[in-house]
Amino acid sequence: MLRRRAQEEDSTVLIDVSPTEAEKRGPYGSTAHTSEPGGQQAAACRAGAGSPAKPRIADFVLVWEEDLKLDWQQNSASRDRTDTHRIWRETFLDNLRAAGLRVDQPAVQDGNTTVRYALLSASWAVLCYYAEDLRLKLPLQELPNQASNWSAELLAWLGIPNVLLEVVPDVPPEYYSCQFRVNKLPRFLGSDNQDTFFTSTKRHQILFEILAKTPYGHEKKNLLGIHQLLAEGVLSAAFPLHDGPFKTPPEGPQAPHLNQRQVLFQHWARWGKWNKYQPLDHVRRYFGEKVALYFAWLGFYTGWLLPAAVVGTLVFLVGCFLVFSDIPTQELCGSKDSFEMCPLCLDCPFWLLSSACALAQAGRLFDHGGTVFFSLFMALWAVLLLEYWKRKSATLAYRWDCSDYEDIEERPRPQFAASAPTTAPNPITGEDEPYFPERSRARRMLAGSVVIVMMVAVVVMCLVSIILYRAIMAIVVSRSGNTLLAAWASRIASLTGSVVNLIFILILSKIYVSLAHVLTRWEMHRTQTKFEDAFTLKVFIFQFVNFYSSPIYIAFFKGRFVGYPGNYHTLFGVRNEECAAGGCLIELAQELLVIMVGKQVINNMQEVLIPKLKGWWQKFRLRSKKTKAGASPGASQRPWEADYELVPCEGLFDEYLEMVLQFGFVTIFVAACPLAPLFALLNNWVEIRLDARKFVTERRLPRTDPSGAQAFLLAFSSDFLPRAYYRWTRAHDLRGFVNFTLARSPPSFAAAHNRTCRYRAFRGDDGHYSQTYWNLLAIRLAFVIVFEHVVFSIGRLLDLLVPDMPESVEIKVKREYYLAKQALAENEALFGTNGAKDEQPQGSELSPHWTPFRVPKASQLRQ
């Protein structure tokens, strides 16, 4: 049953705290309270507070900037907006105090422009309360750390010293864990120490949950949460504090008290550690599971690229050797004036095939028998990589307590909760929560699909324009009168076209990602998982077409619809492209290298320069404001000021997108360029340390949210099958193969020009396809079917032989479930195993006035 949003004030509080004078300026909604069902949980929190927490600077920081000089210069509307923002901030901070947070606002130097900070920290009781509400998993029993790498295990088995291994201090222990319950607090490991029981990432999770739910205005205006305050410009930034500076102390890197950030910088983010394993457990402890899983995938994928790069390089070296021993290539280069080729356009000159010797040799580097072996190798490599990543990800998901995330009912996104027009009972919890009609969402998704189709059409239009550009450029170069340039006309046009295509790809990519984000927000997806899935689907559909349309065209369509002399096919009046003397595979390799390597180089330059430029501008802007406010330029910075000068963390989507696109190039089109895995490996070695440095040194600490193509290429783009057919039917040593692949111009064309010329095709003298063409077509189709079935069968066998989850992990999961069931058994005593309730330790920092209440319904949180 749907209900329209109520217009009245919210009447529920999260936590009842006896208000101080500083907190009497505004309540959380109203001062009306519900009953007190949480007294027992509060007692449990007090009982578990074995030692008082050490003072913390802050768990979270809110920042806003005030320009007092503009107050008298602004018009009435601007002043009203400034006043409204000030009221919203004050209300938001008051409601955070009412929710049980400590809000400190350090003194700042007043001036015309002021940067103000609010330091937020949560008490032990608030942390306990929200840890149970968020169903956080906390440790029950410590385990020996069992992190391992397949390469480390292999080297140990072979007895070879492992140069990749490095001892990193302060290794995070591994635990059996279960969802936190306040009334079972003493059964959790380390619950007697308030300072270490909740890790920094858990504290950030809890703070972010409170910030996402806390209102700052009336429900009817959808004024809720930190996201909207940032979007409206009420706040400039919201971020958790780093653990301290990343630079090592004067005593050196072996100093006994390095903070977590310094450990990561010293043993992970430095360029000198490019050949060492990543300390993933340390990364997870400091940055959270999402960041750690990204680096785990990047490291795993990069490690698997090593054998692919070695095999690909060997295949390329074989091609280099075959260039000088291949008989058809020698025939072409030594043909001199034996093969006069037909003009590339109506006004273009005739040219000699021997002038394309260098192109033919370049094509032989990639197109030879070893390519077949490498294609089969890469197909099986991709299957094995994905199967073993399933095992690796299952192991990490268990060790990092995120294996059952999808099984837990997710809460509505704060943006969805703020914008949903109605409420309805949740079928799982039975509580009212924001609701958006499925029919309305379906209509919006259909409209979004139309936009996606239109953007794909734009990509196709750009591809057509590139095709026309290459054809026109080839004609222009051919008409230059230079015999050498005429032979290279197609390659010159192709190379410049690839560069122009890369520019189009990067521009369209930036535009579409922003458009996809707007469309996905408009579709009103309830949970963050559904939002991310919808956004990812849109982006990958578009990016697949955007990045792969040109290689697909070259691989499967270019040179197929050319026609023959005297009857050439045209596109908008321009003759269709044909493959150059070296074949389409060398052109596909060129396109692959320009797009993949060019994109990697540009991305790496952006990742190096843009954060530094942004960081420099942020520091310059803020320090100039401090100087105007009267602060001394040499004054020491406070931690929150230093972190505000860093670049905001923008998420991991772009990083994942870059790697997935690279993986597509490496697996789909690798038959055209065996060196693709090598270039990917070199890029990823740089990418790992570059991203590590960004996260450790240049970015603010991220907010922790609670929450068969190879066969086709060989068959249709390679000369492998035509060579095999010629070897079997005509000459085993391939002598005369060049003449075999060239057709003669029709008699009408020869009579018009008073000379006979040759062109690459399997056609008769009348211009029609010859019997050889149809025989080769049947062989190509049969090769595709056989190759795909062999790869599929082997891949399916490997899938059956490699279980998705290691047996050792399955045993641990069952053991953890057993321990959790024992620890949280309701029929046991509330505290301890002897039935006696523990006494509250002395020195607890908990306020006797603190009483937790059940988290209000989602509809009540939008005040």
Image: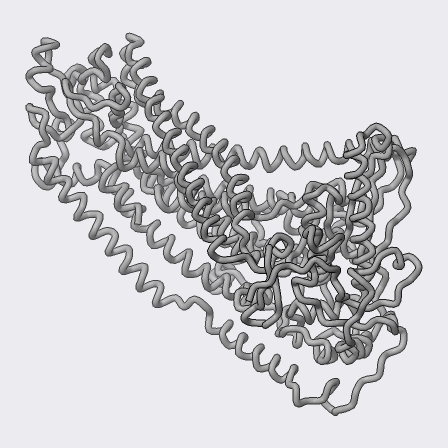
Q: Residue at 60% across / 42% down in the picture?
A: 690
Rendered image quadrant of residue 345: top left
Q: Does 543 sit above or below residue 830?
A: above
**Residue 604 at x, y percent in the picture:** 56, 36
Q: Residue at 66% across / 56% down in the picture?
A: 704
**Residue 548 at x, y percent in the picture:** 38, 39
Q: Residue at 78% across / 32% down in the picture?
A: 621
Q: Residue at 66% across / 55% down in the picture?
A: 287
Rendered image quadrant of residue 385: bottom left
Rendered image quadrant of residue 576: top left
* Viewer-proximal residue among 796 and 617: 617
* Viewer-proximal residue among 328 and 711: 711
**Residue 799 at x, y percent in the picture:** 35, 64
* Viewer-proximal residue among 420 and 757: 420
**Residue 661 at x, y percent in the picture:** 45, 43
Name the quadrant of the N terminus: bottom right
User: Can I make out residue 713 in this image?
Assistant: yes
* Viewer-proximal residue among 292 and 24: 24
Give the side of residue 684 with respect to residue 740, left or right.
right
